[in-house]
Amino acid sequence: MSNETNTPEVRMTVDGHIAVISLDNVAKKNAITPELMHQLSQRLTEFDNDDNLWVAVLDPAGEHTTAGLDMPKFFGPTATAKPIPADQIDPFALEKRCRKPVISVVHGITYTIGIEQMLASDIVIAADTARFCQLESKRGIAPLGGAHFRYLTRTGWGNAMYHLFLCDEFNAQEAYRCGFVQEVHPYGKHRERAMEIARLICKVAPIGLKATKAAALTYIAHGEKAAIAVIPDIQKTVFASEDFKEGIQSFVERREANFQGR
């Protein structure tokens, strides 16, 4: 269990095919330092590169997702921030992005980059304690981690501008109404539900899921024609897999498929 004497770190534990990645800086409400940002990138890269890991659950330690950046360490005279290496996963998915399903767990204070990181994931499960605020413009700056376009893709122009312009704090139910989060549960139960969803996803062929995510991102980046154009490549990829054969055989035999990710 985390406590306030722990050295800030990002841990990764493995549960079957699930990687649980936990940023722990509880003493500072999980404020993110440059070192923690790089550790998060490294853990996400380890997950993405491991063929035996199929789903990641990002579960910040303690009662709060994050209070945001440790500002002096990013922008002060003694700042230590460095770019994420190009061959590593970008936690904001602005550069290299995870190819596999990523579930974000959020609770308590979920400010600024906490929102941007959850919106860079695929599914968000919130505790009823979650409080959100994109408050950069109150500090004379602007969101730099993707909020300016991911608010639009998740919730549409009106809801996006409402919260981006007001820089207001809103609760988990409002986040659910807008589409930022997919489910809201009592604190503690939300972690259990995220793991339940991850286990359900692990029953699905991972090659098919990677192909689906890649195709969906093609649509986001390039539009409908480009998404249609990649269908033959998707077909070629999935039809050549052992999981495709297992999926068909399990259907014929009326049993649950046992996918292997190859």
Image: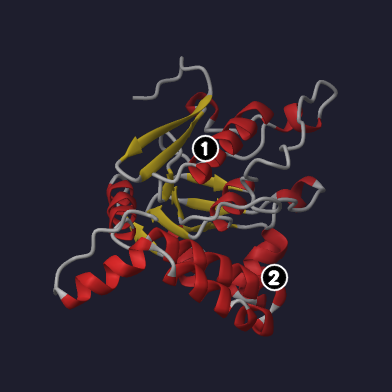
Taking the spot 72% from the left edge, 62% from the top edge, the residue there is 148
* Quadrant (top left/top right/bottom left/bottom right) for the C terminus: bottom left
Q: Quadrant of residue 152?
A: bottom right
Query: Total marks drawn?
Result: 2
Q: Secondary structure at mark 1?
A: helix
- Name the amino acid type tagged 1: Glu
Q: Residue 188: horizontal and vertical position, in percent?
A: 29, 44
Q: Is residue 46 left or right of residue 248?
A: right
Above or below, 52 against 101 in this view is above
Q: Residue 185: horizontal and vertical position, in percent?
A: 32, 56
User: For the residue carrying disc 1, how many other residues have a C-alpha within 10 Å: few (<14), some (14-19), or many (20+)?
Assistant: some
Taking the spot 27% from the left edge, 74% from the top edge, the residue there is 248
The circle drawn on residue 221 is 2
Taking the spot 35% from the left edge, 36% from the top edge, the residue there is 14
Q: Read off the residue under disc 1.
A: 46
Above or below, 250 against 137 in this view is below
